[in-house]
Amino acid sequence: MKLLLDRVGRLLLVMGGVSFLVFLLLDLLPGDTAEVIVSGSGDPSPGAVEAMRAQLGLDRPVLVRYVDWVFGATQGDLGTSYRTGQEVSAAILERLPVTFQLILMVEVLALLVAVPLVMLVATRRDGILDRVVAGCCFAFQAIPNFMFALLAILLFSVTLRWLPALGYVPATEDFGGSLKSLAIPTMALAAGLIPVYVRVLRNEMIRTLQEDFILVGRALGLPKWKLLLQYALRPSLPTLITVVGVNIGTLVGGTVIVEVISGVPGTGTLLLDAINSVDYVLVQGIVLVIAATYVLANFAVDLINVTIDPRMRG
Amino acid sequence: MTTVHPSASPAAAGDGGRPAAVVPATRPSGTQGPGPAPVRKEGRPRIRSTKGRDIFVKVSMVWMVLLAAVIMLEPLLPIPDPAAVDYYAIAVAPGQSVAHPLGTDAIGRDILARLVTGGRVSLTVGLGAVAIAAMFGTVLGIIAAFFKGLTDRVVGSGVDIFLAFPPLVAIIALSVFMGPSLSTLVIALGLIFTPQVARVARSAALPYVSREFVTAARGMGSKEFRILWREVAPNAIVPVLSYAVVLVAMAIGAEGGMSFLGLGVPPPQSSWGTMMGEGRAVLAASPHVVLVPATTMFLTLISLNFLADYISRRFDIKEAAL
């Protein structure tokens, strides 16, 4: 319970810190929203800019505006985009499912590859397959994900013509087509995660396989697959769960480049658009959501770990 | 960049990377060594397959030295102007032309020349950013580990906040604020990597803070600062160094991603990422415009990873011999 309070406190601290940092950072930048709006309307006189500032409330001190914004945020109101007139929370909610779908696909693919691979490899440690896998992992983790995206486009869309290079189909319209449209960004992002998951799970699995109950199971003549799947996998999972959780948190802010390359209309593309069009209210909102997801994912991991392993309650 | 995976790729951090983590499990103290002993170098206990990796380490070193030499000696070498356009050789594939050994890009610029000048940008960003991050991060991390209590909490919260902050926003905001330039990129990436280094430095220093020699130094009347600097810091430095080399690779990758999006170094300059970004438009017709810089970058990144791995293994073996 004390731990829980501690975590919640930390969660609030981090979110407060991040949002204040963004607020301050964006405030320091030259060129504010008022100027953008006024110069767009064709009357860029200093008086008009001042009037617009007053109208938007931008003439108040930063701290006042920040407190105001936080009050709004706690009630789900992140402000209104001055550029499109759309509510920020609505704009984000529209894009968030796309990014979440992408992240879900990435995690599923990464685990579907990593877990069976480790099962194959862990029983024959230092065998040929183990070394090949280790080598591939080493090479893969050196490659930045935008390079994977480029190579995947080159291979699957340009050469083989199997997958579309650009675009996104919503899952509600055409489920298969939706999976297909996200296939390249999924592979690009998963390629960077698989080595991490393999390394973590392999270490745990090797440790588990040295336990006495595995020896007993083997002595009883249990088939190998049953031994691995039913008895060895579960005790090896906690560390992997932690790593997966942390990675889900980082992915929310880490999909930007791959989303842009593949033309996926998720929060990453929205963020880049917002920055390029000086739509600071929107940037603030997205950054808050990204930070919140990151913190919540870490929080969830802590809770899961505490639930499955009482020793961590200490 | 982003995507920078903060927690995703600390190959040599924390557990000391994959190979180091395997070593303790397979090393039975002494007797059961693999094969005949005399072949071993310097009598260090080794597991098999290390030899194969040492070749990679040597090749990596050769590649990095070669790269650094070519980049630094570029004015002396017979390399064409990277901005010069050869109208008679547009998008020539590598190996097709004597004048352009690695081919030309979509508007006829020599790829080899651009690789060399772009490499200077990429390496400057990588080394510069990590130098900043290593300096601030190490100091912060060791101070947090040493003084514990409130200091540790304050640094820890700062690290948490910065890790939750999307790096792309930080880079873009800084480049708007300070004007897009090479030094902006270096500072921005340096700031982004600082909390990660601080984390590694903290966990590296923590076990030493309560060791006997620290108590002994204190008993002999050393000042706290001296203990921090002379007793704790030197012990924490090797894991940080190994992680820093991985970070150089990550910084180069991150810079590539930023330049790829057109948010990196401003136009007259270009980096490997810029080259890939430009090549994306002609991916179907002439893939080599992307593939050549991609290969160069890959070789550099994997070399750095091999070197980091090597550093952490060296460290681990020394520890085990104690």
Image (cartoon, helix red, strand yellow):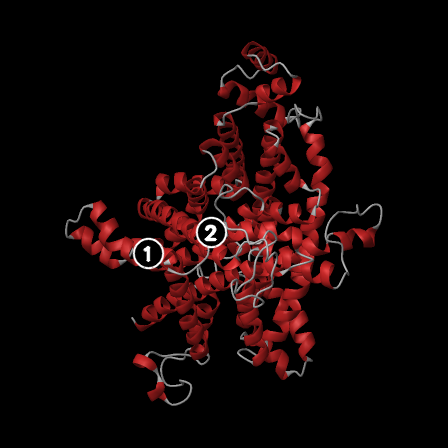
Q: Kindly give the residue lying farthest to the bottom in the view shown.
A: B36
How crowded pointer 1 is (Cα within 10 Å; few <14, some 14-19, many 20+) is rated as: many
Q: Are marks 2 and 1 in contact (CB under 8 Å)?
A: no
Residue that mark 2 sits on: B251
Q: Does A199 appear above or below B247?
A: below
Q: Position of residue A264 (x, y in %)?
A: 70, 45
| Alpha carbon separation for disc pair 2 and 1 | 22 Å
Residue that mark 1 sits on: B236
Q: Is residue A298 visible?
A: yes
Q: Is residue A306 visible?
A: no
Looking at the rendered structure, the secondary structure element under dot 1 is helix
Q: Are marks 2 and 1 on the same chain?
A: yes
Q: Position of residue B290 (x, y in %)?
A: 59, 57
What amino acid type is highlighted by mark number 1? Ala
How crowded pointer 2 is (Cα within 10 Å; few <14, some 14-19, many 20+) is rated as: many
Q: Position of residue A183 (x, y in %)?
A: 72, 56
Q: Which quadrant would residue A231 be assigned to in this image?
A: bottom right
Give the number of the disc on residue A179. none
Mark nearest the camera among 2 and 1 is 2
Query: Which is more N-terminal, label 1 or label 2?
Result: 1
Chain under callout 2:
B
Question: Quick check: B99 left or right of A118?
Answer: left
Q: Image quadrant for the N terminus of chain A?
A: top right
Question: Quick check: B176 left or right of B285?
Answer: left
Q: Residue at coordinates 54% horizontally, 32% vertically from top-left?
A: A19
Chain under callout 1:
B
Q: Which quadrant would residue A268 be assigned to in this image?
A: top right
Q: Kindly give the residue lying farthest to the left in the view shown.
A: B220
Looking at the rendered structure, the secondary structure element under dot 2 is helix
Q: Residue at coordinates 59% horizontally, 15% vertically from top-left?
A: A44
Q: Residue at coordinates 66% horizontally, 50% vertically from top-left?
A: B281
